[in-house]
Every structure is written in structure tokens, then in C-alpha cells.
């Protein structure tokens, strides 16, 4: 049963160091701030149920830290796995599953196995799994207009023709900027409204829903033609889920997903000041429970005990190469690191022909999959910036070179 952990947050992470709502994500504070989000937001605890589902351990672990990797920062040089994780990825925790077995689990930068770490936008992918379940249960239809599920969009010209699938694929065509380097980008206004940071003078923390209704009101592209990353669209999916089930989003996460994976610890869901769970980025999990949730995608929608939770068709839809999705993905901003990529159902499909895709969150949160090799890597990070070329190159090095090393064993 969902429990209230924090009703009125004190907005203080560390009083001695002066860490609070305004600076929790400063680079020097991230290692702490990302494990203490319940002090900054109203927070609900999502409880596990039933026996813990065991992550089967391999007889021989993979000593990733002692392996040699290419240096993503200095061309032509090498560095150890330990250096890659600590100095390039800025990793806090890493777990690797290969051929159904746990081969690596490690923690650094002060994080412990029992700590909950915010997984940021990886939350979006978990929300999409709930949408897939709702589609399977005939509660939602990907081809229907999103306005059928979120009545506030009815009669608004900018939302006409926008389907649920367009929202899932971030092809809604609504004007929005999530450029973290631009202080005037829509994202920062939204983030303050949702409670990530204190409001500026003249602003109010009106909550995620109200901000969306008031600000996502201009059409920029025809629906289904351009991929534009927009965190708010994941919240729109959450609204649709609440409306069709007539149940709170936290309860849906708990009952339909979290309690089905055999979690070992409660997950924390941060909400805005109005109590709406911020499904675009505010779920907090210990690393092993993050892996249990993510493993549904590795196991064709089944949990570790073989029970079907997410429809297998959803996994296929995510990873199958799609020419239209690829074209839409590259239209606004060229991805030179992943030129064959597409974005599908709230997942980054970096190499669809190789069945490689990921959940991805700012500051280095990820669950990366290589279905062909039966490989999953799950990590928490404190990369000093929200994103950037170096972060992606470091993650790409970690993922691809580890996969090659395991294949060579």
C-alpha cells in the first residue's frame, strides 16, 4: 500500500554544507542530492509485495574495474575500468546481467546497495511499460487521440491530431525546448513549477499538470514528423493512466509493476506540491530493484520468475528498426554518435539493427540492453552536467566495449 514518506519537505539536504532545493544538483553535491530527493519533494513510498525475486549470481564475477578500456576523453589512450567509471562516467553504482546471471555489482562515490538513487528520465520508460499494460488491457489505444484520455486538451488546436503513440514517441509536434544549457528553455520553467528548484520572482510552484496546460500551447511541427525530447509528455502519459484507471499513478506503479518484480525495498516516488507523481523523472530505487524493473525488457516482458508482466509485443515495438522513427529522430538535431538511432515508446534505441537500446536519465542514469547478447547493464551516476557529448561517449564506451569483452570470454 502506498505510504506518505514526506508530506511537507523541509527542502534541506545537508544543513552544515548549505545543500538544499536551490543547489542539490551542483556537481560537488550530486552524490548526496540524488539519494535524498525525499527531503526536497512530497514523497510517496511504493511498497514491495511477496518474496524477493533473486538476481541469480554467476559462479565467476566479471571484474570490470581491472579491464582496459578506450579513453573517451583522450583519443588513442587507454584507462582501466575503474578509471572509466570514476573519472569519465562518474558512476555511483553499476550492475551487469549476462545470460540470465548477475556477473557484476559495484558501488562507489559514497553510494551503498541499500541507498535509493533518483533514476531521473529512466522513470519515463517505466511509465511506458504501464502504458503498454493498459493497452493490453484495452484501457488505452495507441492510435486514439491523446485528448480522448486527457480531456483538458479537447478543443485545443495545437493538440488536434496528436495520438497517444505520438506522445509515447515524443513526436507530438508541440513547441518545447529541453536545452539544459539555455536558462530560458521551457524545461527550467517547468522544473521550477514542478518543485525541482525554487520559483523565480513572479513564479509559483503550480505543479506539473497546471504548467503543461498553460504552456504547451503552440504547435511547431505536424504530429508524427519530428522527434523533440519533451519531459512533460511523460507526465501527460501519467495523466492518461490516472484518468482511464481512475486510480493514482503511484498506486498503478505499485500494483501493476513494482509488486510484480519481487522488489526488496520500497521505491520512493516524488510528487509536485499538488501530489501528482512526477513520472518524467522522480522515481527513486536501490540499484537491484532498478535492475529488477529493467530486466522486464531483457526477458521479453517477463519477471525473474517467468511471469509475463509487460506484453512481449511492446519489447518488439521498441527495438524493431523503423524508418519513419529514424527520420523523425534526426530531423531537429543530428545525433552523430548514434546515426542509426530512433526513439520509440520512451526508450532510446541507439542501434536497432543490433537490438541495443536504453532507458536514459540525466547525470548518467541508465539501463542499457543488448538483446542479441542477452546483456543488461544498469547504472546510477553523478555526471557533473545533465548531459553532453562526453557523457554519451563515456557511456557508449562502457556499454559497447564491455559487451565485446563478454562476447570474447
Image (cartoon, helix red, strand yellow):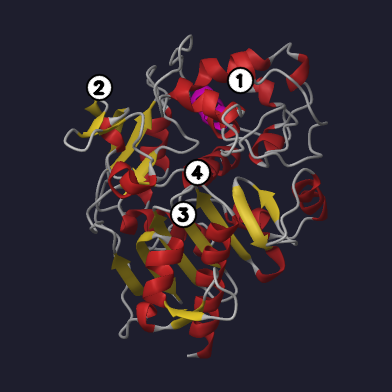
Residues tagged 4 and 3 counted as in contact (Cβ below 8 A)? no
Q: Which residues are magenta?
A: 236-245
Tell me where residue 126 appears, x and y as whole percent: 48, 45
Placement of the N terminus among the 4 image quadrants: top left
Q: CB of mark 1 within 8 Å of CB of mark 3?
A: no
The residue tagged 2 is 7
**Label 3: how many residues lie within 10 Å, few (<14), some (14-19) or many (20+)?**
many
**Dot 3 corresponds to which residue?**
364
Q: Secondary structure at mark 1?
A: loop
Q: Is residue 239 magenta?
A: yes
Which residue is tagged 4?
Answer: 121
Asked if disc 1 and disc 2 are in contact, CB closer than 8 Å, the reply is no
Q: Could you give the CA–CA distance between mark 1 and mark 3, rounded to whole angstroms?
A: 32 Å
Q: Residues within 10 Å of mark 2 (few under 14, many from 20)?
A: some
Q: First in sequence, mark 4 or 3: give its number.
A: 4
Q: Residue at x 31, y 75 (%)?
A: 57
Tell me the crowding category of disc 4: few under 14, some 14 to 19, or many 20 or more residues within 10 angstroms, Cα based: many
Amino acid at each position: 500500500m502506498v505510504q506518505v514518506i514526506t508530506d511537507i519537505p523541509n527542502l534541506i539536504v545537508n544543513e552544515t554544507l548549505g545543500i538544499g532545493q536551490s543547489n542539490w544538483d551542483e556537481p560537488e553535491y550530486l552524490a548526496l542530492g540524488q539519494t535524498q530527493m525525499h527531503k526536497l519533494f512530497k514523497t510517496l513510498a511504493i511498497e514491495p509485495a511477496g518474496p524477493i525475486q533473486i538476481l541469480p549470481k554467476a559462479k565467476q564475477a566479471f571484474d570490470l574495474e581491472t579491464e582496459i578500456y578506450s579513453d573517451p576523453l583522450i583519443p588513442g589512450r587507454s584507462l582501466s575500468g575503474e578509471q572509466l567509471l570514476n573519472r569519465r562516467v562518474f558512476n555511483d553504482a553499476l550492475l551487469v546481467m549476462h545470460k540470465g546471471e548477475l556477473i557484476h555489482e559495484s558501488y562507489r562515490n559514497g553510494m551503498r546497495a541499500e541507498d535509493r538513487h533518483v533514476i531521473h528520465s529512466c522513470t519515463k520508460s517505466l511509465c511506458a511499460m504501464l502504458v503498454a499494460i493498459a493497452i493490453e488491457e484495452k484501457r488505452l489505444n495507441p492510435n486514439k487521440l491523446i485528448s480522448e484520455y486527457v480531456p483538458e486538451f479537447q478543443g485545443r488546436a495545437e493538440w488536434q491530431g496528436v495520438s497517444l503513440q505520438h506522445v509515447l514517441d515524443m513526436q507530438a509536434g508541440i513547441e518545447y525546448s529541453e536545452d539544459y544549457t539555455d536558462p530560458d528553455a521551457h524545461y527550467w520553467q517547468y522544473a521550477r513549477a514542478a518543485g525541482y528548484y525554487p520559483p523565480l520572482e513572479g513564479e509559483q510552484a503550480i505543479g506539473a499538470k497546471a504548467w503543461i496546460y498553460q504552456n504547451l500551447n503552440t504547435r511547431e511541427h505536424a504530429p508524427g514528423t519530428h522527434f523533440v525530447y519533451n519531459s512533460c509528455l511523460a507526465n501527460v502519459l501519467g495523466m492518461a493512466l490516472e484518468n482511464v484507471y481512475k486510480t493514482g499513478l503511484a498506486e498503478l506503479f505499485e500494483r501493476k509493476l513494482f509488486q510484480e518484480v519481487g522488489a526488496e525495498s520500497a521505491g520512493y516516488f516524488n510528487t509536485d506540491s499538488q501530489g501528482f507523481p512526477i513520472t518524467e523523472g522522480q522515481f527513486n530505487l536501490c540499484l537491484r530493484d532498478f535492475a529488477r524493473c529493467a530486466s522486464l525488457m531483457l526477458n521479453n516482458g517477463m519477471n525473474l520468475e517467468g511471469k509475463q508482466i509487460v506484453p512481449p509485443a511492446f519489447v518488439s515495438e521498441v527495438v524493431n528498426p523503423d524508418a519513419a522513427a529514424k527520420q523523425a529522430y534526426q530531423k531537429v538535431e543530428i545525433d552523430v554518435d548514434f546515426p542509426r538511432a530512433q526513439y520509440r515508446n520512451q526508450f532510446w534505441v541507439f542501434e536497432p539493427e543490433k537490438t541495443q537500446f536504453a532507458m536514459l536519465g540525466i547525470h548518467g542514469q541508465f539501463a542499457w540492453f543488448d538483446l542479441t547478447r542477452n546483456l543488461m547493464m544498469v547504472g546510477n551516476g553523478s555526471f557533473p552536467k545533465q548531459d553532453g557529448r562526453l557523457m554519451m561517449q563515456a557511456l557508449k564506451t562502457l556499454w559497447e566495449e564491455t559487451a565485446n569483452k563478454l562476447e570474447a570470454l
